[in-house]
Image (tube, rainbow, N blue to C red):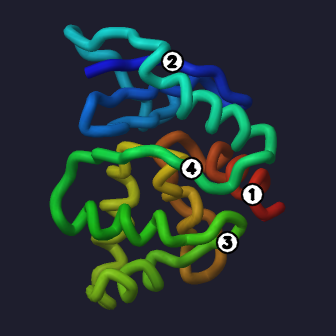
């Protein structure tokens, strides 16, 4: 597995992936803080394009990522993550709306758990999911990060 740490306005971000695609995008802070396992190899050239895309995103110049994704998870989790990728830039959805979109209308708590286990933050936009009451709820890297990302995208 290759990795690179890139800077962001929030905190450093760990990128990790291999020839299959991008597997992790994690802030190096909060409950979701990732550690770099032994055996991973730093490879800046491998992540050059996605690093540039993230830089443009944080500068407010990019609203859609072009990158091959290869997250690891259960089929249900992957279905939720695909649904998250359908949420347009600058918009939000509720956990209930995501549950309905994956064909499990009563599984909004399971959607919340899948959302929490999303290994590819920002690009798989779990930050765009809010509570039914319109309030910000749960984010592994902290609600301040979720609020920052939503403010960047839609002035939330």
First-in-chain label (2 vs 3)? 2
Q: Are marks 1 and 2 in contact (CB under 8 Å)?
A: no
Q: Distance between the Cα atoms at labels 2 and 3?
A: 28 Å
Q: Nearer the viewer, residue 22 or 31?
A: 22
Question: For mark 3, what is the residue?
Answer: 91
**Which residue corresponds to the image point at 51% horizontal and 18% vertical from the top-left?**
5
Compute the Cα span from label 1 to label 3.
8 Å
The quadrant the N terminus occupies is top left
**Residue that label 2 marks:** 5
Instruction: Determine whether, in the image, residue 32 is placed left or right of residue 153.
Output: left
The residue shown at (46%, 66%) is 84
Q: Position of residue 9 (x, y in %)?
A: 73, 30
Above or below, 136 relative to 149: below
Q: Which mark is residue 2?
A: none
Q: CA distance from mark 4 to mark 1?
A: 14 Å
Q: Is residue 140 above or below residue 83?
A: above
Return the residue nearer the eye: 92 or 124: 124
> On the picture, is 154 further left or further right than 99?
right
Q: Give the residue pinned by disc 1.
A: 153
Inter-mark Cα distance, 4 to 3: 16 Å
| Chain-order first, disc 1 or disc 2 | 2
Q: Earlier in the sequence, mark 4 or mark 1?
A: 4
Q: Quadrant of residue 70?
A: top left
The Cα atoms of the two marked residues, 2 and 4, are separated by 18 Å
Which quadrant of the rendered structure holds the C terminus? bottom right
Residue with the mark numbered 4: 65
Q: Disc 4 or disc 1, which is closer to the eye?
A: 4
Residue at figure coordinates x 83%, y 61% from the top left: 155
Q: Secondary structure at mark 2?
A: strand
């Amino acid at each position: 597995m290759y990795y690179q740490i890139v800077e962001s306005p929030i905190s450093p971000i760990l990128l990790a992936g291999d020839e299959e695609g991008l597997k992790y995008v994690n802030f190096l802070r909060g409950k979701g803080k990732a550690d770099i396992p032994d055996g991973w190899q730093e490879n800046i050239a491998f992540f050059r394009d996605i690093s540039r895309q993230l830089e443009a995103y944080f500068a407010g110049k990019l609203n859609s990522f072009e990158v091959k994704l290869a997250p690891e998870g259960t089929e249900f989790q992957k279905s939720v993550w695909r649904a998250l990728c359908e949420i347009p830039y600058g918009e939000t959805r509720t956990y209930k709306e995501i549950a309905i979109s994956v064909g499990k209308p009563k599984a909004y708590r399971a959607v919340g758990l899948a959302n929490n286990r999303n290994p590819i933050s920002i690009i798989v936009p779990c930050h765009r999911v809010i509570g039914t009451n319109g309030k910000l709820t749960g984010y592994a890297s902290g609600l301040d990060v979720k609020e920052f990302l939503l403010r960047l995208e839609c002035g939330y």
